[in-house]
Amino acid sequence: MQNVNPLDGVISYITAKKLFAGIQSLENYLLSYPQMPGLDKLSAIKVDYELMADYWKRGANDPEREQVYEQLLRRLYVLAMNIRAHHLYRTNSYWITTYQRPRKSRTEWGLTGIREELENYVTETAMLDFEPAHIRANKSLQLNQRHQTFMSNLFEYVLTSRQWKDSLSEQFVDILLSPTIDTVDQQLLVSAITLAALNAFDVNKVLTLIKVYKQSTDICVRQRALVGWTLTVNAEKSTLYPEIKQTIAEIGADETMCQELTELQMQLFFCKSTESDQKKIQDEIMPDIMNGGHFKMTSKGLEEMDEDALEDILHPDAAERDMEKMEQSVTRMTNMQKEGSDIYFAGFAQMKRFSFFYDLSNWFVPFFANHPAVNNIWENSKGQKFLHSIISRGAFCDSDKYSFVLSFDQVLNRLPAHILNMMEEGEAMAMPLGGIVTNEERKTPAYIRRMYLQDLYRFFRLYPARQEFRNPFDEEKIYLFFASELLCKTSLVNRMSEVVNFLVKRKYYHEAEEILCLYPKDKRDYQYCFLRGHLCQVQPEGLGGEDKFWYKAALKLKPDDKKALAGLARAHFYDNEYRQALDVYKQLLDINAESRSYMLNASICMANLRQCEDALKLLYKLNYLDEENMEVVLVLAWVLTIDGRFDEAKKYFAQLMTQEHPQADCFLYQGYCLWFSGDIGGAIQSFRRYQDLLIASDPSLEDAFYLTENDVIRKYHIGKGEIQMMLDAIKG
């Protein structure tokens, strides 16, 4: 949220437990803004503080002094947050409107009245079954329109509510757990509480979400509450409320809840990866699908459409290749979706401009066919089978389902009659990209949670006034709840390595490091040491840093562990410590003598140590086992060059040049081979090709000649003068 409030400084004092400084700061603020309420309540807090301080100065022994101090901090926090809300709702145009709209709706917002309205809706909906069909539809529409207006106002009322008291929290918990209230309404209320607690931490809103998560038997309500409390619990502000720490410790002791929290943490990173996943889909997957445009989806699957017979004669295999590429791309997208990627975001991003999304609550309302905005479209006989089928089978979040239905209504009347007939007769099969989701999968907690997270992500990325909300997916890293001090001190710490492994795999290195840094010392096992070493190694700034230290620590715990040994060998190699790296690779070969990667890496170390005879033994074996492995061929050609066997080396360089895109090193080492064997013109051409292909991490020719390969150059009696002539010739 972009708004900076002058009361943020007061709240900082409170969370730092500097009570008197907080009182003084808030008092100065209220004296500067006499129109603001709260001075009387602040005076009461100040009097109580001064009374406590006076007893303390007199040396009186008060065993409850610390408890009273904490209570005063809480009172001051609640007052400051309520004044902060008062300021926001009177100075910010968006929040002025959002605050006033439900309060001008002539609705009495007492909890008793709210509960009655929610329960009456369920009763009235059930009673519609007894109405004649021609009356039922009209009454249903009227009932749902009235209720949707009520829920929209209730959503904004909860969103703009001040700090909750314990009693209010208990009443909301009862509403959210009640079997007599519709699940759609309960889910929507959970989202309203979540948004409110995100924008302004409120212990009772957070505890409401936690209690609902722990107690609800409705899986959809429960999963929304789980997402809600993990994104709104605040470690810094929770220091004022030890009951939160105790409640989370209880959750951490439950194996099922730990599993759900672990899954949720990973799912949040799939949301974070949405844009990179969309780029992959747009650049790598969709072109193959679109190029397969002469195929159509039918009830029998992919079928080829009629094409020019001449094309079949000229290119008889083209259709088969296109079909194969298209099927591979569809499968790839399906696998991305099943793994957890949000494959539909870009496609639906432009469909959030309907007036439906002007209503804030509609971004979070679960999809139900009786929603007054889509009911007429849903019941329309034209295209109904197709619409119902694709909505029920695709992995669409609720927000996208509404978008699809609203868009379908606009497209429907423009479709040719024969297409409509195909849709109704089932010939145009409703096969969403990403594949069909089974009913069993839809009922799983992971799937329900993933769809809700996608709703949240769309809101925070696409809602026009999104800047007014604290975004859990932005730089604050609210989404990284595994790095919260509240959670890492529970048994959830046993799941940390699983999450860190996931983050490293998806290249979220800094986030992985943040979690590892919170590992308790008594939990720093082999897995911890290995991951610390791996993180030091995979991050560019970590190369040659502490990776060797951590790998060695891991090996003390598991002396023959192949992963740690391989990491240590790489660490030595990156530091140009080829002899030490070779020693480790020899250990690895003792464990697995047939590992081709160990043999190749060992031979590279030998090449750098100029141990040509030993390197060639390994390289000839590798080349025999896999003649097409160009990495082996390149190292083999270079070692032969070092050893002065130029004619043999040239044969392998010729093989390297048959590749469609030889890598830069092929030309560098070929240049050396030609230079040393007396073919100066050929060497110049090869070095020029190398220079054309240089990337930032490659050594310049000058560095190569004077540093990395200088010992080999001197071996063939080439002095500084000839080196400089070669550099000049390459430039010329």
Image (cartoon, rainbow, N blue to C red):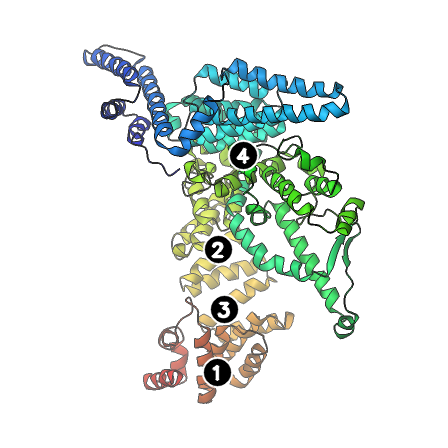
Q: Which mark is residue 604?
A: 3
Answer with mark 1 or mark 4, whichever residue precedes in sequence: 4
Vertical placement of residue 16 versus 614, above or below: above
Nearer to me, 96 or 519: 96
- Mark nearest the camera among 4 and 3 is 4
Residue 536 in the image: x percent, y percent? 42, 52
Residue at 45% from the left image edge and 74% from the top image edge: 610
Answer with mark 1 or mark 3, whichever residue precedes in sequence: 3
Q: Which amino acid lies under the numbered mark 4 shown in the image of this protein?
A: Leu
The alpha-carbon separation of the residues under discs 1 and 4 comes to 58 Å
Answer with mark 2 or mark 3, whichever residue precedes in sequence: 2
Note whether residue 234 is visible: no
Q: Which amino acid lies under the numbered mark 2 shown in the image of this protein?
A: Gly
Answer with mark 2 or mark 1, whichever residue precedes in sequence: 2
Helix, strand or loop under label 1: helix
Answer yes or no: do the residues labelled 1 and 3 have beta carbons within 8 Å?
Answer: no
Q: Which mark is residue 673?
A: 1
Helix, strand or loop under label 4: helix
The alpha-carbon separation of the residues under discs 2 and 3 comes to 16 Å
Neighbourhood count class around disc 3 (C-alpha, 10 Å): few under 14, some 14–19, many 20 upward: many
The alpha-carbon separation of the residues under discs 2 and 4 comes to 30 Å
- Mark nearest the camera among 1 and 4 is 4
- Pointer 4 residue: 261
- Pointer 2 residue: 567
Note whether residue 635 is visible: yes
